[in-house]
Image (spheres, rainbow, N blue to C red):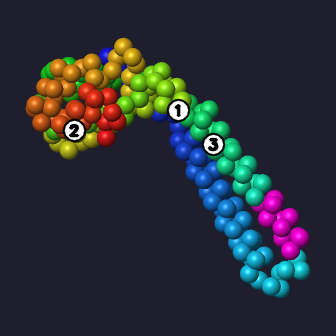
Amino acid sequence: MYRIINQKSGNRKIVDKTLGILAAIFAAVFVLMLLATAFIPSLYRFKETLNQSVFVVFAIEMGIIVMAVLRYIFFREEATVLTGGNLELSENQITANGQDFSVSDLRKIRFIGNDIRGDFRGFVTKGTDNTLMITLNDGTEKSWKFEQTEKHQLKNEKKILKKYCDAGLLSESNYENILNNTNYY
C-alpha cells in the first residue's frame, strides 16, 4: 500500500516561472548594455555611467539566480505534502483513492519516477516524486502521485508487476526498470 499525494495549488509554478522570466529579462538587458558600451563609439564617453548601470543589472540578475537556487534546494518538495488516500496493487485490480480499477478494464499501466523516501540523490528525498498512470479501455487516462518508502517499494511487488507485464498492460522496459531500481521512464 502506498500513500497518494495531492498537489498543492499552482502558485509554486507561477513563482518559478516569474523567477525564470525575470532572470532572462535581466540577462538580456545585461548583455545589451555590455554590447552597447563595446560597439557604439558615441556611448564611449558615458562609459563610466553605463558600467555602473551594468553592474547594478548584474547584481540584480545574480540575486534572482541565487533566490531561484535557494528555492530549489530548500523548498523543492514542499509542493507535494498533502496526502490524498491510498494506492493498492493486486493481481486483479488497482485501487486508488477508494476507486477500484479491474485489470480487465485497463489498456495500459505506466510508472514514472523512482523516488524513495530517504534516498540521497544530491539531497535527501521525501519519496513523493512517483506517478502511476493508467489508461482505461475507453481511452480515459488517470494518474496519481504516490510515495515510496524503504518498506513500500514498487520493486517489492515483483509478482504483481510481472502479471501486469504478461497481460500486456505494463511495458517490458518499465517492468525491468522498476526491478533494476532505475528511473521508470
Q: Position of residue 48 (x, y in %)?
A: 89, 70
Residue 134 located within the stretch drawn in magenta: no
Q: Is residue 102 visible?
A: no
The span picked out in magenta is 47-57
- Which residue is the site of mark 1? 122
- Mark number displayed over residue 173: 2
Q: Is residue 45 visible?
A: yes
Foreground: disc 2 or disc 1: 1
Quadrant showing the N terminus: top left
Q: Amino acid at mark 3?
A: Val
Residue 87 versus residue 43: which sits nearer the camera?
43
Residue 54 located within the stretch drawn in magenta: yes
Q: Seen in the image, is 152 located left or right of residue 168?
A: right
Residue 10 versus residue 112: which sits nearer the camera?
112
For disc 1, the neighbor class at 10 Å (few under 14, some 14 to 19, many from 20) is few
Distance, label 3 to label 1, CA atoms, is 14 Å
Q: Earlier in the sequence, mark 3 or mark 2?
A: 3
x 38%, y 22%: residue: 148
- Work out whether 136 lies above or below 59: above
For disc 3, the neighbor class at 10 Å (few under 14, some 14 to 19, many from 20) is few
Quadrant of residue 103 in the image? top left
- Which residue is the site of mark 3? 69
Q: Secondary structure at mark 1?
A: loop
